[in-house]
Image: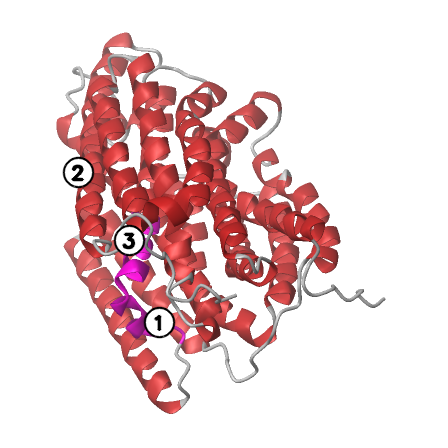
């Protein structure tokens, strides 16, 4: 059966339906980054997974995606972004079924890795299809603002949806809900997505992806080992060497590819544009904050306060409540306010919000919610235009590469948050915990271990909870400092992008 040709340019109805379709794909991808935060305690108990295995259930997804994203963008340039989006949907749906019915933690980790392969195909294509389908600059800025808000909302809603499903179904349902959305997108995409131009001179360089994966895997292992209790120095040293070697090999290969074929997977020259670099930093930092805050907050309120998964998910939904209106307003007002006010100014607001959240984290839930809403509003404004700063400041021939860099920024930020802040929270717990005499040995290794082994002992739970609260507040303070630094750095990078200045060097680049 042949697919009917899509008229060019798209009609207004198809254009906005295209945005709905690719946004559904983005929603799935970002939901799967955070939906396990509230499901993790239940999943860990039912699959009898250890602390390290539990973190790899989460980390396998962003790690594999980061390694593949740059190559996937190049494949989209070569074979067509619509085709790659469809392939990604099929892989994502199949992997969701495998994850939902995984019999053990090893199969679940493998299924999460396959989910990442599908997501890596889909994600660059979503932004590239928006570029192709929206030829009016202001409409495109608004569409990208919606796209960015979906990324934020998906990440923020993940814990809520996970908690809601666990109230009524088994843990596999958090993956099974992907399937109907995938099927709907598969039906709509051939009708609404433009074919676009393809460039057969570009090619996927598998070796570059291998080097990138080695660098990221080594870095994650090194971070986990360095911030975990009782680090193994040989493992840390080997991980650091692998990360450094992978990064060096990847950089060297990109330079060689540029000299030989003129089309590296990542052209480092694009970072000379300050707006592009600021957009990358903004995307990575925003997802670092969202991923880290949601992870430690949902864990803290489930393990210490006894919240249900749904209750803890609703708590961190305050981030989405602030981010959605700010993201939509940011995309619509970019042409008036300029990049600097929205990116750096958004980080300033998020810093204030995170400070309020950190000061009230263990004493006042209402003020914690206020802080999270303000943080979400600031990050929403930032992320609504970060994508425009990235994709609007490269030539059209590098559209797929720029989209991939943007997605790597998001995923790397989330990956770093889980690897660093998740491990750091555990380390701080083990360093500060003072359990009563006779407490089980495993209770000192993690808060989840203390809850599982406590037998309801109130003294043990109180001591463990006090230690985890210290870790929780410390992590939030670190996140606050990271946002403040990002506000200063992006403000300097965007010093020439004030009100009324163009956000893109390639306005007609679509």
Residue 411 lies, in percent from the top left, at: 39, 52
Secondary structure at numbered mark 3: helix
User: At x 60% / y 74%, what residue is drawn?
Assistant: 197
Of helix, strand and loop, which one carries label 2?
Answer: helix
Q: Pointers 2 and 3 in contact (CB under 8 A)? A: no
The spot of residue 268 in percent (x, y) is 30, 72
Q: Is residue 61 visible?
A: yes
Q: Label 1, on which residue? A: 211
Mark 1 or 2: the one toward you: 2
Q: Earlier in the sequence, mark 1 or mark 3?
A: 1
* In-image side of 371 versus 355 (left or right): right
The alpha-carbon separation of the residues under discs 1 and 3 comes to 22 Å
Q: Is residue 468 visible?
A: no
**Quarter that holds the N terminus:** bottom right
Give the alpha-carbon distance from disc 2 to disc 3, as whole Å.
Answer: 15 Å
Left or right: 97, with 77 as reference point: right
Disc 3 target residue: 281
- Give the residue drawn at x 33%, y 89%: 259
In the picture as drawn, the residue positioned furthest to the right comes out as 1
Q: Magenta segment: does it hold 268?
A: yes
Q: What is the magenta range?
A: 265-285
The secondary structure that most of the magenta stretch takes on is helix
Find residue 481 and report its horizontal and vertical position in percent: 17, 38
Task: Find residue 49 and report its image quarter.
Answer: top left
Question: Which picture quadrant has residue 290?
Answer: top left
Q: Which residue is mark 2?
A: 481
Q: CA distance from mark 1 to mark 2?
A: 31 Å
């Amino acid at each position: 059966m042949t697919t009917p040709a899509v008229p060019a340019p798209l009609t207004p109805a198809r254009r906005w339906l295209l945005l709905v379709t690719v946004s559904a794909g983005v929603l799935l991808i970002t939901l799967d980054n955070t939906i396990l935060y509230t499901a993790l305690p239940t999943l860990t108990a039912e699959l009898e997974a250890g602390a390290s295995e539990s973190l790899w259930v989460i980390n396998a997804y962003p790690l594999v995606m980061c390694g593949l994203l740059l190559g996937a963008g190049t494949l989209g340039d070569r074979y067509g972004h619509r085709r790659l989006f469809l392939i990604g949907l099929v892989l994502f749906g199949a992997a969701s079924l495998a994850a939902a019915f995984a019999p053990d933690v090893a199969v679940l980790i493998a299924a999460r890795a396959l989910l990442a392969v599908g997501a890596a195909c889909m994600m660059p294509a979503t932004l590239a299809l928006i570029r192709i389908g929206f030829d009016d600059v202001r409409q495109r800025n608004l569409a990208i603002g919606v796209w960015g808000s979906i990324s934020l909302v998906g990440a923020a809603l993940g814990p809520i949806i996970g908690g809601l499903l666990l109230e009524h179904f088994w843990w596999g349902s958090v993956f099974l809900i992907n399937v109907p959305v995938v099927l709907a997108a598969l039906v709509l995409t051939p009708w609404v997505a433009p074919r676009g131009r393809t460039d057969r001179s570009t090619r996927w360089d598998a070796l570059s992806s291998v080097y990138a994966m080695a660098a990221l895997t080594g870095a994650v292992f090194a971070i986990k080992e360095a911030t975990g209790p009782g680090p193994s120095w040989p493992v840390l040293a080997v991980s650091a060497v692998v990360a450094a070697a992978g990064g060096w090999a990847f950089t060297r290969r990109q330079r060689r590819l540029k000299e030989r074929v003129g089309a590296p997977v990542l052209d480092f020259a694009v970072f000379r544009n300050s707006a592009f670099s600021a957009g990358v930093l903004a995307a990575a930092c925003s997802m670092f904050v969202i991923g880290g805050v949601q992870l430690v907050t949902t864990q803290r309120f489930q393990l210490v306060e006894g919240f249900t998964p749904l209750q803890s998910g609703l708590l961190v939904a305050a981030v989405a409540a602030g981010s959605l209106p700010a993201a939509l307003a940011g995309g619509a007002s970019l042409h008036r306010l300029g990049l600097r006010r929205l990116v750096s100014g958004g980080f300033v607001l998020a810093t204030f919000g995170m400070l309020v959240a950190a000061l009230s984290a263990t004493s006042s839930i209402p003020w914690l919610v206020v802080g999270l809403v303000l943080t979400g509003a600031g990050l929403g404004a930032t992320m609504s235009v970060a994508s425009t700063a990235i994709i609007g400041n490269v030539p059209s021939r590098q559209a797929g590469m720029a989209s991939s860099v943007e997605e790597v920024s998001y995923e790397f930020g989330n990956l770093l948050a889980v690897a660093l802040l998740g491990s750091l929270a555990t380390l701080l717990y083990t360093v500060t915990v003072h359990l009563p005499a006779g407490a089980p040995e495993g209770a000192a290794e993690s808060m989840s271990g203390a809850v599982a082994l406590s037998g309801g002992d109130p003294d043990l739970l109180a001591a463990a909870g006090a230690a985890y609260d210290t870790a929780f507040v410390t992590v939030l303070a670190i996140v606050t400092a990271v946002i403040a630094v990002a506000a200063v750095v992006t403000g300097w990078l965007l010093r020439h992008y004030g009100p009324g200045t163009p956000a893109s060097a390639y306005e007609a680049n679509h």
